[in-house]
Amino acid sequence: MVGSYVDPNLVFAWQAAHSLARNSPPPVHDRGGFRVDTHSEKEVKRWVFPKLCDGLYDIARDISMPRHYLKLCGTNEELRNALPARWEIQPENYFMKATATPAETNSLPDGYRMEVHQAGPVTRVQIVAPDGELAATGSAAETMDAFVYDRIETASNHRRKGLGIAVMRALAVREEVLRWSAAPGCDRRWPQLVYTPWLDGDRPVRYGDHSGRGFLKSARVSVNKKPAGGKPAGLGHPSLGCLARRGDPAKRWD
């Protein structure tokens, strides 16, 4: 099995920028992990743990209400064995570190147009189809430690047209401007992190290098599922991500 170690500082940097992109409160340190008091329609709170620790076990035992999420940079088996039966494993997610900006892309298909909106540290890009339908979207957020891509998505009936890559490239332009405008002597080379791949066709498209991989597993309290034999509920699936250093060529794999 591929090792799942992820630098805790990298995890915190991702969550801080991720919170900016989602307009959520910033993360705080909590019992070995990082907590975000989201208070959104989907979730009340989330904890992200770089690795298994006593704090994760404690939180899992204490919480019995739904809409609370535990996320672990680890394997499905590790998280499953750490949780009481009322918790269920969620579908796979990815924790990836881009190694370079996406390559230049061709112009958009005829009739499509791109809109770029900047609001402080957050950039949002959307591509509009000829009929006015939203065809592709994505956002990115910057902190002093990270530049994070978030929610890169192409509508199902507009896939296989290079729109997802076009969104990534438009967001990457912002990162390049920031990097080159940094003060002389300032080594502001933040990692570019991608939380989930975007869909362009039937399979996810991901950028990165195969030099390292990590796992990001998520679980929530099950509302209707009853404990069975004291065993944790749900099996889930292993989630492969990518970790690499800036300067290495970006690669695509399916």
Image: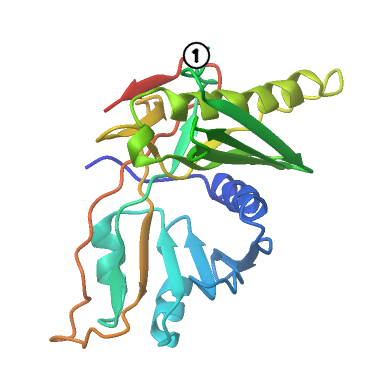
Name the image quarter holding the N terminus: top left
> Going by the image, does 63 lie left or right of 170?
left
Specify the farthest residue to the right. Answer: 183
Q: Amino acid at mark 1?
A: Thr
Which residue shows up at 54% across the image and 73% down it? 45
Q: Nearer the viewer, residue 85 or 5?
A: 85
Residue 169, image x, y percentages: 56, 23
Task: Name the residue nearer the viewer: 204 or 9.
Answer: 204
Q: Residue at x 31, y 53 (%)?
A: 92
User: If the image is split into quadrants, where does the C terminus sit?
Assistant: top left
Q: Say whether residue 116 is left or right of residue 219.
A: right
Left-right relation of 61 to 127: left
Q: Is residue 125 visible?
A: yes
Determine the residue located farthest toward the left in the rendered image.
Answer: 229
Q: Nearer the viewer, residue 249 or 74?
A: 249
Kind of element beneath mark 1? loop
Tag 1 residue = 105
Quarter holding residue 62: bottom left
Q: Is residue 150 above or below residue 47?
A: above
Can residue 53 be seen here? The reply is no
